[in-house]
Amino acid sequence: MDESGSDDVLRLVLERVDSRVSLIRAAAVCRRWRRAIADAAFLRRYRSLHGPAVAGYYHNERISLRWRDGRPAFVPSSPSMVDARHFSLDFLPDVAGSWTILDGRGSLLLLGHASHAEFSDNVVCEPLTRRYRRIHLLPDCVDGCYGWELFLLDGESNEAGGRISMSNFRVLCVFLRGGLTHAAMYTVGSSWNKKNIDPSLKLSVPMGHSGGCWYFVQGKALIILDGSTGDFSSSELPPLRDWDSDTWEHDFFVANGRDGRLHIFTLSDNTMKMLTRLEGGEWALEKSIVLPEATSGLPGYEPSSFSGLQLILTIGTGFVILVPLCVNMWPFSINLETMEAAPAEKNMGQLVYEFELPWPPALHACLDR
């Protein structure tokens, strides 16, 4: 077998290495293996086969059930394997007040200065490498504007399967001026540029993020922001018996099931309904649950607890944590697969950002040794 053939066999073997730690150890075996693993085509193929490694989850701590979110916090996916100290944000510049997580993608976080109502002072950082880049909004995005929304997007290049990194990311800013929606895009190396967007688009009712996309309700339409491209799309939601065009933020949210499928949930009149996307792309009602009935056997249950609204505390993979807005507030979780209720063990804040280990691994420094 010639050298090119043996290299092909080597790459096939290395593609089957099931962990990044083992892959890095394999790169230390010899120069030939290091070069094979550091090849951009190999890294892209490996990433497509094995997916990202999740170190844990960031969220904004909730000061109380009735007050706004507090400082960012990190929860390791496996406390025995992941040292949370390596994911501290204490390297960020000191500011009056605190930083708040606005978005998270891959191994990066987008944070805003919480004391600035318009979040004009922002940073994108990579906690594991303790690097950050400060990003200030253009005056055109601030003067005479309101309703700012910032989103962290993939970069434009993808040579080694690393869709986002400190040298390859974008930030989308959507804002209102004169009642119309405008947008600007920040790209590493070229700063801010205006982005064309439908001026009638409204993002006032966010549903959350899932599978790399952000979701919003506008009237009876579902608005989707693709975190890879930065483009918006829309689809019609199915008519519900109690549909009300005057929707509010607590009425809709999105979450991934443990099977990886995206679900939409609605909360209305103490009933939770689950919508699932069919093969043709349309949304249909799959199941529903009456919350007072489902929680009646839980500790702390009182019929009066459901005389008002339900507050969403946490949205996670396969579960959601709710709390009735009443005198005796007690949180409970709903399993999104079985729709069964259980006492809530932990409140991780309303939005949870999955944190991936940086990709690709740093191997280039040892290629010639």
Image (cartoon, rainbow, N blue to C red):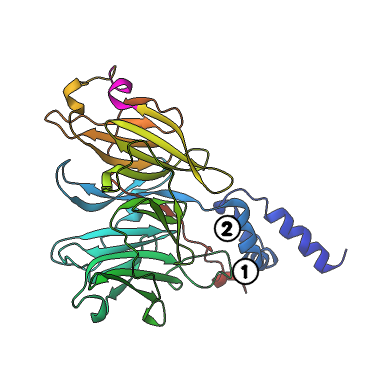
Q: Which mark is residue 249?
A: none
Q: Residue at x 13, y 66 (%)?
A: 96
Closer to the camera in the image, 240 or 167: 240
Q: How far apart are labels 2 and 1 at the CA level?
A: 15 Å
Residue 57 in the figure: left or right of residue 19: left
The residue beneath circle 1 is 40
Residue 5 in the figure: left or right of residue 45: right
- Report the mark closest to the observer, 2 or 1: 1
Residue 292 in the figure: left or right of residue 226: left
Dot 1, how many residues are within 10 Å of its Cα: few (below 14), some (14-19), or many (20+)?
some
Q: Secondary structure at mark 1?
A: helix
Q: Secondary structure at mark 2?
A: helix
Name the quadrant containing residue 136. bottom left
Magenta span = 290-296
Dot 2, how many residues are within 10 Å of its Cα: few (below 14), some (14-19), or many (20+)?
some
Amino acid beneath label 1: Ala
Closer to the camera in the image, 112 or 218: 218
Does residue 224 show up magenta in the picture? Answer: no
Q: Split into 4 quadrants, where in the image is the N terminus? A: bottom right
The residue beneath circle 2 is 24
Any part of residue 180 in sight: yes
Q: Residue at x 33, y 41 (%)?
A: 243
Q: Residue at x 14, y 46 (%)?
A: 67
Residue 303 in the figure: left or right of residue 5: left
